[in-house]
Image (cartoon, grey):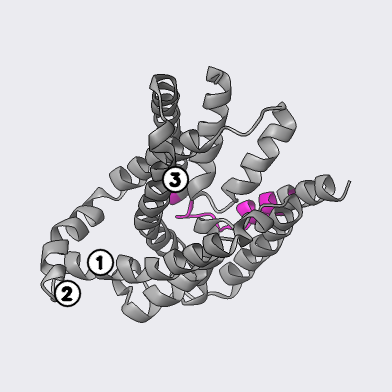
């Protein structure tokens, strides 16, 4: 696989994984613009690993507490901040895992990967993000995250199985509707991405592992490194901008992207 192709896929995936602008929409658009073929599952796994490392490093203090709280949680107690966060992340991940398994078994996932579906999802859920950001109150912080809200936002996250929705975008949308401030909504969304990305990487990795060779491993390592750098930069920039900027610029971008994808789909 050409180095420049690996670079583009990793950078695009790294940036769009955490910004609420739909990574699938961009990865569909990339080969149309550049004339590339699909990068394959091995690169998909690699860029997921890269973005996972980026979010874990950025939110290491919170995630470290959750990891240390796991033994306590396994004994049936969620009476420490770390154990409580671990429980909330587990509960928020259940809906997307169950829905993902159902979609995979029924074969609906292939039907959902059409350019038309991705275009409409990019457009519609972008507008929904704008609506939630405009009417959503600022009553809660990430420290107020509770079991009920974890399950509700987890259900929103399951909607992201529709390509073009944007996992970060839809979970931020759900959090804003529930009254979380912009930065806190983004933080909850990013923390929720960790178990989701791990589950996705394990699922894809299991299918790739048997066919991997040295060339694939080399390309994967390069892709993971590029994805890590771009994801960390995008995440850092977004969290800083949310101190003073709304989600409107991302919504405008999504509307433009959605219109472009739909124009390509219907022509």
Residue at the disc numbered 3? 204
Marks 2 and 3, the one that precedes in the sequence: 2
Q: At 32% from the left edge and 77% from the top edge, which residue is drawn?
A: 146
Q: Is residue 151 above or below residue 42?
A: below
Q: Is residue 244 magenta?
A: yes
**Quarter holding the N terminus?**
top right
- The answer to which of 224 and 230 lies nearer the viewer is 224
Q: CA distance from mark 3 to mark 1?
A: 26 Å
The residue pinned by badge 1 equals 85
Mark 2 near mark 3, Cβ–Cβ under 8 Å?
A: no
Mark 3 residue element: helix
Residue furthest bottom as drawn = 148
Q: Identify the residue under disc 2.
A: 78
Residue found at x 19% / y 53%: 64
Answer with left or right where residue 83 lies relative to residue 201: left
Tell me: 151 left or right of 71: right
In the rendered image of this protein, does residue 179 appear above or below residue 36? below
């Amino acid at each position: 696989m050409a180095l420049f192709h690996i670079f583009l896929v990793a950078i695009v995936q790294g940036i769009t994984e955490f910004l609420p602008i739909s990574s699938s929409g961009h990865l569909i658009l990339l080969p149309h613009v550049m004339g590339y073929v699909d990068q394959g599952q091995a690169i998909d796994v690699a860029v997921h690993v890269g973005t996972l490392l980026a979010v874990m490093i950025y939110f290491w203090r919170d995630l470290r507490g959750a990891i240390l709280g796991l033994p306590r949680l396994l004994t049936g107690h969620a009476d420490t901040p770390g154990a409580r966060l671990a429980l909330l992340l587990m509960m928020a991940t259940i809906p997307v895992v169950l829905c993902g398994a159902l979609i995979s078994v029924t074969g609906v996932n292939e039907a959902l990967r059409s350019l038309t579906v991705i275009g409409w999802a990019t457009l519609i859920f972008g507008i929904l993000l704008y609506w939630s950001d405009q009417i959503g109150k600022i009553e809660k912080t990430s420290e107020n995250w509770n079991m009920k809200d974890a399950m509700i936002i987890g259900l929103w996250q399951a909607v992201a199985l529709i390509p073009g929705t944007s996992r970060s975008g839809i979970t931020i949308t759900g959090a804003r509707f529930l009254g979380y401030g912009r930065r806190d909504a983004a933080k909850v969304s990013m923390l929720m991405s960790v178990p989701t990305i791990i589950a996705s990487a394990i699922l894809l990795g299991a299918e790739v592992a048997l066919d991997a060779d040295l060339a694939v491993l080399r390309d994967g390592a390069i892709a993971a490194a590029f994805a890590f750098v771009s994801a960390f930069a995008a995440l850092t920039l977004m969290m800083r901008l949310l101190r003073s900027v709304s989600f409107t610029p991302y919504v405008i971008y999504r509307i433009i992207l959605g219109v472009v994808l739909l124009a390509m789909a219907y022509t």
